[in-house]
Amino acid sequence: MNGDQVEVFPVDDDLFEETFCVNYVYKFCGEEVKINQAFSANLGVAAPVWESALQLCHFFEDNKVPLKGKKVIELGAGTGIVGILAARLGADVTITDLPLAIPQLQSNVSANTPPGGWRSAVPTVVPLSWGQDQKNFPSDWDLVLGADIVYLPDTFPLLLETVTHLCKDGAVAYLSSKMRREHKTPRFFDDDLPQMFHVELVQHDAQQNISIYQATMRRDV
């Protein structure tokens, strides 16, 4: 793994003592995605659009990843930019995060409703707590997506359990992550995820120290 530089990544609930909002329009794959980022003590790290999410969106665009008609679930969605883009491109999308992030996600989904309606279904926004709720969800997804969700080592087993359940019928997972050694992010992709998945590094941005991995379940475990 590359990336020895120590990056500061906030994990405290009181990250933002004051509440303020930032609106921005992103353009990918010919689509405009309007994102409201509600910076507040309640949302913490769920408030911003992280660079890993933007890189995953660019990856879809640059590699012409087929999304139309696909059944997609996004984990730890935060602002929802990745799932919203997938839905704008015709995927049937379920967007998940912890309960505190659900209002922001619902607001951003509503703000991105196309004038003629969604190409597939209206994106579903529901809470999902890793290691607890995943069995309430089916396993028949085509794609499981996550951007900058690998940064708390205590959650690695819960994330692995969740992704394993969601992918057991053959889904492909795309996980985009800042490779923060101080948060043991490389360990998840080098040691934890390969316990259950074939893992392939499909893109690495050395300047940003962001990697995108493709993972498919192993059938020999």
Image (cartoon, helix red, strand yellow):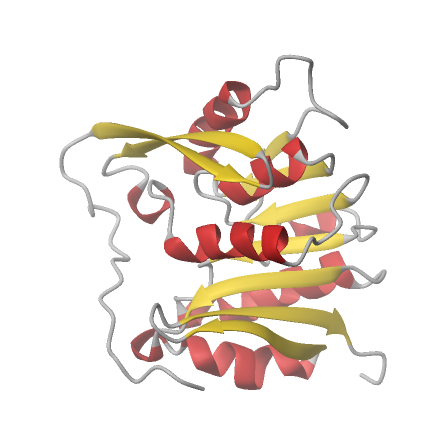
User: Which quarter shows the N terminus?
Assistant: bottom left
User: Which quarter shows the C terminus?
Assistant: bottom right
- How far across and how far down the image is residue 115, in percent? 62, 13
In the image, farthest residue toward the top: 115
Residue at the spot 82% in from the left edge and 39% down from the top edge: 69
As drawn, 154 above or below 89: below
- How far across and how far down the image is residue 57, in percent? 54, 50
Residue at the spot 54% in from the left edge and 78% down from the top edge: 189
Specify whether 164 is left or right of 206.
Answer: right
- How far across and how far down the image is residue 213, in percent? 59, 70
In the image, farthest residue toward the left: 17
Residue 51 visible, this orientation: yes
Q: Quadrant of residue 197?
A: bottom right
Residue at the spot 28% in from the left edge and 57% down from the top edge: 11
Q: Quadrant of residue 17?
A: top left
Comparing 62 with 174, the one in front is 62
Residue at the spot 69% in from the left edge and 13% down from the top edge: 116
Specify whether 123 is left or right of 22.
Answer: right
Residue 80 visible, this orientation: no
Specify whether 173 is left or right of 41.
Answer: right
As drawn, 35 above or below 177: above
* Circle count: 0
